[in-house]
Image (tube, grey):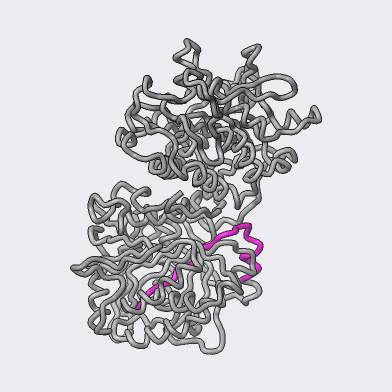
Amino acid sequence: MAGITPRLLPINSIMPTDTYRRVLVLEGGGPIGGAYQAGVYYPLAQLGFEPEWVAATSIGAVNAAIVAGNEEGKRVERLKEFWDLVTTPSPWQSYGSRPEESTGPRARSASQGQEPPVAETPSDWPSTSVPGFFTTIPNTDPNAQPAYDTRPLYRTLERLTDFDRINDLKMRLSVQAVDVESNETTFFDNYESKKLGRKIGPEHILAAIASPPGFPPTEIDGKRYRGGNATSRKIIDYVIQDDRRDILALQVGVKINEPSTIDEDESFQTLPSPGRNNTVNVVHLTYRPHDSIATMSLREKVVESWNRGASEASRTLLSDTWRQEAKSRRAPERPAEFSGTERRTYIEDSTESSVTLLFATTRKQASEPEYFSGERETGTVNYGKAKVHVPRQRALGQVNLPFELKVFGLTLYKQAEDPDRHFILKGCQVMQKDEWLTEISTSGHPEALVFVHGYNVTFLDGVYRCAQIAWDIRYPGIPILFSWASRGSTLDYLYDRDSAEFARPRFVALLGDLRRAGIQRVHILAHSMGNFSILSALANHPHSEQPLGIGELLMAAPDVDTDVFLDLAPRVRRVSQGMTLYASSTDRAMAISKKLARRARAGDVPDEGPIILDGIDTIDVTAIGDEILGLNHSTFASSKSILNDVKLLLTTGIRPPGNRLAEIQGMPTGQVPSKWWRYVL
């Protein structure tokens, strides 16, 4: 949908999924419910909640077939393609129509005194055709009931769904239908069909969405079938018959004309499983469209529903409430064959609180306790890893270090380290490049977050800040620090700028090395002058020849000349999946840079407003609070709100920013779509 770029970020470590059979249950709900389901699936792909089993009814069966019938990396794109197709143009009627005005199949069925077979709202379906879904069957009798031909959907499913993959049992698929003659509910299940030597095809999906008389029944093996009830109680009952493993089900539905809120107390439920030795946990995610959706075009409704699904799913799945409940209700550990791929742990939050990070630096080696100086290493890049203890008694986003008094480089006093209050370097190991790359290739992680620090930062400053960010957002991949040779002094601005330029080709080489070591996606968080180095590097890299797999690029307070930024950023946009600019009008360090460079900086927010470029989300973070040393220059790392946004962006990729957090509001006020965004606290 508009503003959504699919990507895959498997991070099972934040969710209790290793011993559970992961089941996605999709109800009905017409185009709005269907688009909401597709939006819900989007963060599931990012959060590693790839289902082993999809069970669905009504419009949910279409989404389920597309998910089950595609490889992991293609599922979101195929869902997007389907919903783009069926909403171009916009033939569905809007919500808000009175039932007696509707000409859809449910309304016609009801007018004849029949119980509507599918729980769609009366105004969901039009009396005209829908591209890739159905066409109107011509009829010269003005009193005849309109009917529809769903063969276009058959062809669409053939194109977007690999039914060979479904029948090869790559993922379990179950769709609910009802025998028209006996009125008995049945499930077309690829696992059960395999036992009988049968196959699942597009006709089974058409049976699940059939709604006579408008959508005709589908004949399969001599029997006629229509869709089942759009609620999922029977689907859940069918799913829990499987007693071989514990079940963690995400149940997605839609309710119309109810408050647009989520009752978190009802979002997690453990169902009774009498006579069985497994646990059945269900996470409920129910869409309640707000009243204003009635005034939207179908296209706008579908985009709104998709974005709401993505936003609400990410908030639910990332919340501590249900995940802690799931952990507390877990059954004993299962044998090894039920475990997922083992991944090396970089964030330890049990007996100790620590972050292990990897680093690559253009600095020269130095003696302890600095490890690396501010001088440039001209011949090579130094590699290694560091372990940092993270204190639990601190404000989110803050890096607390022991107080140290220095005069002319001599330490006159240093406070004793306190594990309860201070970040403490527990170890720093220099590694050979091959050894370092082996660490990555054997880690089991397909993604990494590379933090590039800014001006006036020592090596250890960068280590602590990288550890703090990784810890506070609980980053599930590999945290990597790229530390270029800043001298860590406010007096060495020009030296630091040259060092940032010096590091440019080394940064590109690093990304190439990560790619060859098996990292599929690299997210980059660059701060201050670090943006100058990476923007120049990425803008001039022949990406088409050597793709680097850039995911999200987050530019925090970029100390880059505005004209240079306007030249480089569009070229970088072509080689990255998404770009976000965090800027501030109160950033004092940015004001210092502006004076030294005698030019406007991209990280500033002048009176005329922030930089706005197509394909880049600009967020004004002026309203965010305190900053270390009063410089307001690490707002990205020292604000809970910013960290929450960074976490949601990296783990879900939800766009636009206003769909991630309520504190982020679109600007100019009232304009749709928004041109930029602002934190409003």
Please give the range of residues in magenta: 437-455
Vertical comparison of 59 with 78: above or below? above
Residue 317, percent from left and from top: 47, 41
Asked if the magenta segment contains residue 448, the reply would be: yes
Residue 396, percent from left and from top: 34, 55
Question: What residue is rendered at 44% in x and 37% in y?
Answer: 91
Vertical comparison of 234 with 384: above or below? above
Q: Is residue 249 visible?
A: no
Asked if the magenta segment contains residue 588, the reply would be: no
The answer to which image quadrant residue 289 occupies is top left
As drawn, the residue found furthest toward the left would be 607
As drawn, the residue found furthest toward the right would be 197
412 and 563: which one is in front?
Answer: 563
359 displayed left or right of 596:
right
Vertical comparison of 7 with 441: above or below? above
The answer to which image quadrant residue 635 occupies is bottom left
Residue 461, percent from left and from top: 39, 72
108 displayed left or right of 158:
left
Question: What residue is rendered at 61% in x and 25% in y?
Answer: 176
For the image, the number of numbered tags is 0
379 and 122: which one is in front?
Answer: 122
Question: What residue is rendered at 42% in x and 37% in y?
Answer: 321
Q: Is residue 118 visible?
A: yes
Residue 44, percent from left and from top: 52, 44
As drawn, the residue found furthest toward the front would be 140
Question: What residue is rendered at 68% in x and 44% in y?
Answer: 162
